[in-house]
Each structure stands twice: as structure tokens, then as C-alpha cells.
């Protein structure tokens, strides 16, 4: 780690003092993600610990998005219908809501961006076949958690960051470093440690704006972070959430097999079509 980065990380605990702890269900689900032999019944056991979440999950499984003929009657039916990886992301989204991290309109705009990138990374994974398609959902959902946590502690200052991003059309990390002395990926890295997040999530939170991702040796980490970075760029071009400037190099698009602008615009179309129902689903509108 270079000295500049160490200086930025050292400032965070002095400034961002109000990081909530992760609810029990969310941390148990994380243990399942990192566990070697996680089974469906382990996941169902954890979900059943939280009755309100369990009943919300059953309601979601019975929403038009999932319901075909029979209604889901219990958690097992609901998990089977919704799918293992998506349930994991939903448990997280519900936990974040319960932690008060989606409380005002700016929070919601930040989460709209997070949910769009979660969907975008899933579509990129599905269309390119580079990753199992459900895999990057939770990575996309949490990739900008640092912005939410900064905004929670430093509302006025962060409003200034957003104004600067909009007026000067510069990347968030540039405005954050100039105005705060650290950026949201630094805060992501810090909170990943506090919450004991699994390595792949921690890597994406800390590195999704890195310019040298192609040099990362671990193929799974590299591909996951690239899928999130690509989704970030595609969602920015669609103007979903608070707009920001994210771009990929030609080599990075090539590594994702997305050199063709036609392919990229096809993915944008899919994201645009699926976004409204995906957002309502993850952010809980009507649930
Ligand atoms: Fe970011
Ligand atoms: Fe982002």
C-alpha cells in the first residue's frame, strides 16, 4: 500500500465515526457466503431467525415477478423460487434498510445507483458468460457503500461533493479526495474490515475505481471487479442515479469481451428495461 493511500485510510476513523454494526442476520449470511459447504437449509435456518424478514421474503416470492401458479407458503418455497444468490442480496438490502441507510432522498438516489450497478453487473456476467450471473449482484449492491456512509456522517460536505461532481463533471473519487481527504473506496475498504466482509466483496469495495485492474492476478477477483466497473460505466451513461464519470480502457472492455459498442448498447437496453422492477424489488417499494 502506498503512503498516500495509508494517509487517506488513517483519516477515516477520525472523521466517519458513526458506522453502524451489521445486523445478526446479515453477518450470519456472510458466514454462509464464505463457508465451504453452504446448503440451502443453512440459509433458510438463518432467514428464519428474523421473522419479519422471513415473511417479507415470502411476500416477495408471491409477487408478480416470481409467482407462476402456486403460492410460496414458507421460507423454503420462497428461497427456491427466488434463488440462492438473489436471496443473499435481498437479505443484505433489507439489513441496510433496517440500519437506516436508506433514509432520505439523497440516500435513495445513492441506492438507486447501487441497485442499477448490481443489475448491470449481473447482466454483464450473464451476457458475457465470464462469471456465474448471480455472482456480482451483491458486489454491485455494496460497491458504493462508502458514499452512503460518508453522506450519513457528513451531509453538508457530501452535498458539496455531489455539486462539485455535477458542475465540474469529474469522478466522485477526485472530488472526495479534494474536499474530504479520502474517497468512498477508502471508506469501503475500511468498513469491509469492520464488518468482516468476505475477500471478494472487500476487494470490489476498495478497488472498483482502480485503473490497473487488469494486472490483478486472481482471475475471480479481477473479473468480478471489472464487471462492477463496467456496470458503473454503463449505468452512468444511462444516467441512472446520481450521474458520475466512470470509464473503462479499451483493454478492459476487451477483457470483458465487450469491445463492440453495439454489444454494450444492447446491455444498456437490457439494464434500462429491467431496472424499474429490479429497483422496486431490491429497495422494497411495495414490499
Ligand atoms: Fe464507486
Ligand atoms: Fe458507482
Image (cartoon, rainbow, N blue to C red):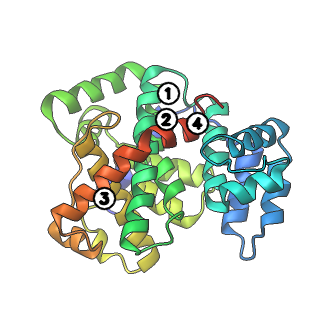
| Residue 28 seen in this snapshot | no
Mark 4–mark 2 distance (CA, rounded to whole Å): 7 Å
Say which label, 4 or 1, has the lower sequence index: 4
Mark 1–mark 2 distance (CA, rounded to whole Å): 5 Å
Q: Residue at x 62, y 33 (%)?
A: 97
Please tell me the numbered disc located at residue 230: 3
The residue that disc 1 covers is 152
Other-residue count near label 3 (Cα within 10 Å), few / some / many at <14 / 14–19 / ≥20: many
Mark 1–mark 3 distance (CA, rounded to whole Å): 27 Å
Give residue 231's position: percent from left, percent from top. 34, 54
Of 220 and 8, the residue lying toward us: 220
Other-residue count near label 1 (Cα within 10 Å), few / some / many at <14 / 14–19 / ≥20: many
Q: Residue at x 78, y 59 (%)?
A: 43
Q: Secondary structure at mark 2?
A: helix
Other-residue count near label 4 (Cα within 10 Å), few / some / many at <14 / 14–19 / ≥20: some
Give residue 37's position: percent from left, percent from top. 75, 76
Is there CB contact under 8 Å for labels 4 and 2? Answer: yes
Say which label, 3 or 2, has the lower sequence index: 2
Side of 268 where 82 appears, left or right: right
Say which label, 4 or 2, has the lower sequence index: 4
Is there CB contact under 8 Å for labels 4 and 1? Answer: no
The residue that disc 4 covers is 19
Amino acid at each position: 500500500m502506498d503512503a498516500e493511500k495509508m494517509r487517506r485510510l488513517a483519516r477515516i476513523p477520525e472523521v466517519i465515526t458513526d458506522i453502524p454494526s451489521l445486523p445478526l442476520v446479515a453477518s450470519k449470511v456472510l458466514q454462509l457466503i464464505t463457508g465451504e459447504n453452504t446448503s440451502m437449509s443453512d440459509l433458510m435456518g438463518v432467514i428464519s431467525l428474523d421473522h419479519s424478514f422471513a415473511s417479507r421474503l415470502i411476500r416477495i416470492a408471491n409477487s408478480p415477478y416470481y409467482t407462476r401458479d402456486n403460492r410460496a407458503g414458507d421460507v423454503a418455497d420462497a428461497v427456491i423460487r427466488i434463488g440462492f444468490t438473489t436471496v443473499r442480496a435481498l437479505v443484505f438490502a433489507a439489513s441496510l434498510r433496517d440500519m437506516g441507510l436508506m433514509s432520505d432522498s439523497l440516500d435513495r438516489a445513492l441506492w438507486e445507483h447501487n441497485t442499477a450497478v448490481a443489475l448491470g453487473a449481473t447482466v454483464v456476467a450473464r451476457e458475457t458468460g465470464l462469471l456465474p450471473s448471480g455472482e456480482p449482484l451483491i458486489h454491485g449492491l455494496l460497491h458504493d457503500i462508502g458514499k452512503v456512509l460518508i453522506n450519513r456522517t457528513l451531509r453538508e460536505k457530501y452535498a458539496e461533493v455531489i455539486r462539485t461532481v455535477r458542475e465540474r463533471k469529474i469522478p466522485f473519487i477526485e472530488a472526495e479526495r479534494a474536499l474530504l481527504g479520502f474517497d468512498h473506496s477508502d471508506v469501503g475498504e475500511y468498513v469491509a474490515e469492520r464488518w468482516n466482509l468476505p475477500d471478494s466483496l472487500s476487494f470490489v469495495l476498495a478497488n472498483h475505481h482502480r485503473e490497473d485492474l487488469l494486472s490483478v492476478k486472481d482471475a475471480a477477483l479481477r473479473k468480478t471487479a471489472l464487471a462492477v466497473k463496467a456496470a458503473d460505466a454503463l449505468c452512468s451513461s444511462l444516467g441512472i442515479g446520481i450521474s458520475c464519470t466512470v470509464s473503462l480502457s479499451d483493454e478492459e472492455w476487451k477483457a470483458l469481451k465487450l469491445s463492440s459498442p453495439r454489444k454494450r448498447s444492447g446491455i444498456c437496453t437490457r439494464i434500462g428495461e429491467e431496472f424499474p422492477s429490479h429497483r422496486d424489488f431490491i429497495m422494497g417499494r411495495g414490499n
